C-alpha cells in the first residue's frame, strides 16, 4: 500500500478590521488538478510520500510544489485507505491554518479558495463528502473506501476519532 498525503489549508474568516468574524465563513484552498490522479477535479494539495520521507514532510513539500505556499505545523486529522483494481493507498490528511505565501498556479494545479459551507462537491472525489466537512470543522476522521469499476463504495467512515501522532512527527507505514 502506497502512502500519500492531502492538506486542507483553512483561511479563517476575518472582519474588515482583521478580527475573527463569527458571522463570516472560513475558506479552504482546493486545487483543480491538471494531470495525474484526480485530474480535472478539485482536491486538497498533496501527493505520494517519497522514500525516507514522513507523511508530514511530504505534505509540506507537496503544498510548496503544487501551490507555492509554505505550510507551518500541519495537524494530522485523518487517515483513509483506498483500494481499487489498479492501486491502493493510505492517505494521511492534514489541516493547516498557519502558512506563508499566496497560492499560485503551477503546471499541476489551479488553486482556488472556497467557503467551507459551499464546496464544489460535485466536482470532487465522491468519497470527500463523507469526511471533508468534519475535517474542515476541526474534527478528525478515518475511513476505508473500495472502488469497483470507478465507482467508490464506502466500507466505513468514523468521525471524531483519535488520530495517532508521535511527538509531532507522523511516520510512514510502508
Image (spheres, grey):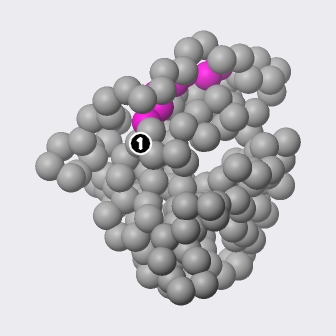
Taking the spot 44% from the left edge, 81% from the top edge, the residue there is: 100
Query: Which quarter of the rendered picture does the C terminus lie within?
Result: top left
Outermost residue toward the left in this view: 167
Q: Is residue 143 magenta?
A: yes
Residue under label 1: 77
Taking the spot 47% from the left edge, 31% from the top edge, the residue there is: 141
Which quadrant would residue 104 be assigned to in this image? bottom right
Horizontal relation, residue 54 to residue 96: left or right: left
Horizontal relation, residue 46 to residue 138: left or right: right
Taking the spot 68% from the left edge, 77% from the top edge, the residue there is: 106
Q: Main secondary structure of the magenta part?
A: strand
Q: Tell me if residue 137 comes above or below residue 69 in the rendering.
A: above
Label 1's element?
strand
- Report the magenta residues as a range: 140-146
How crowded pointer 1 is (Cα within 10 Å; few <14, some 14-19, many 20+) is rated as: many
Taking the spot 18% from the left edge, 43% from the top edge, the residue there is: 166
Q: Nearer the viewer, residue 22 or 112?
A: 22
The location of residue 92, given as percent across then percent down, is 44, 42
The location of residue 40, given as percent across then percent down, is 83, 55
Report the number of numbered marks: 1
The location of residue 138, given as percent across then percent down, is 45, 46
Horizontal relation, residue 164 to residue 39: left or right: left
The location of residue 127, given as percent across then percent down, is 68, 31
Which quadrant would residue 22 be assigned to in this image? bottom right
Q: Is residue 64 visible?
A: no
Q: Is residue 69 magenta?
A: no
Q: Is residue 42 visible?
A: yes
Q: Tell me if residue 126 comes above or below residue 111 in the rendering.
A: above
Q: Tell me if residue 111 comes above or below residue 76 in the rendering.
A: below
Outermost residue toward the top in this view: 155
Amino acid at each position: 500500500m502506497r502512502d500519500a498525503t492531502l492538506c486542507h489549508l483553512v483561511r479563517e474568516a476575518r472582519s474588515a478590521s482583521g478580527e475573527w468574524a463569527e458571522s463570516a465563513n472560513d475558506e479552504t484552498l482546493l486545487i483543480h488538478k491538471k494531470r495525474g490522479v484526480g485530474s480535472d477535479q478539485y482536491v486538497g494539495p498533496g501527493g505520494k510520500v517519497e522514500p525516507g520521507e514522513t507523511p508530514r514532510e511530504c505534505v509540506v513539500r507537496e503544498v510548496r510544489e503544487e501551490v507555492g505556499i509554505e505550510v507551518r505545523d500541519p495537524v494530522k486529522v485523518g487517515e483513509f485507505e483506498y483500494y481499487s483494481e489498479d492501486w491502493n493507498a493510505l492517505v494521511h490528511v492534514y489541516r493547516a491554518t498557519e502558512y506563508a505565501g499566496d497560492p499560485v498556479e503551477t503546471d499541476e494545479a489551479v488553486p482556488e479558495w472556497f467557503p467551507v459551507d459551499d464546496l464544489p462537491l460535485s466536482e470532487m472525489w465522491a468519497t470527500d463528502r463523507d469526511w471533508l466537512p468534519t475535517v474542515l470543522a476541526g474534527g478528525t476522521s478515518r475511513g476505508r473506501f473500495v472502488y469497483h469499476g470507478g465507482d467508490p463504495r464506502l466500507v466505513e467512515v468514523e468521525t471524531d476519532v483519535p488520530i495517532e501522532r508521535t511527538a509531532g512527527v507522523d511516520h510512514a507505514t510502508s
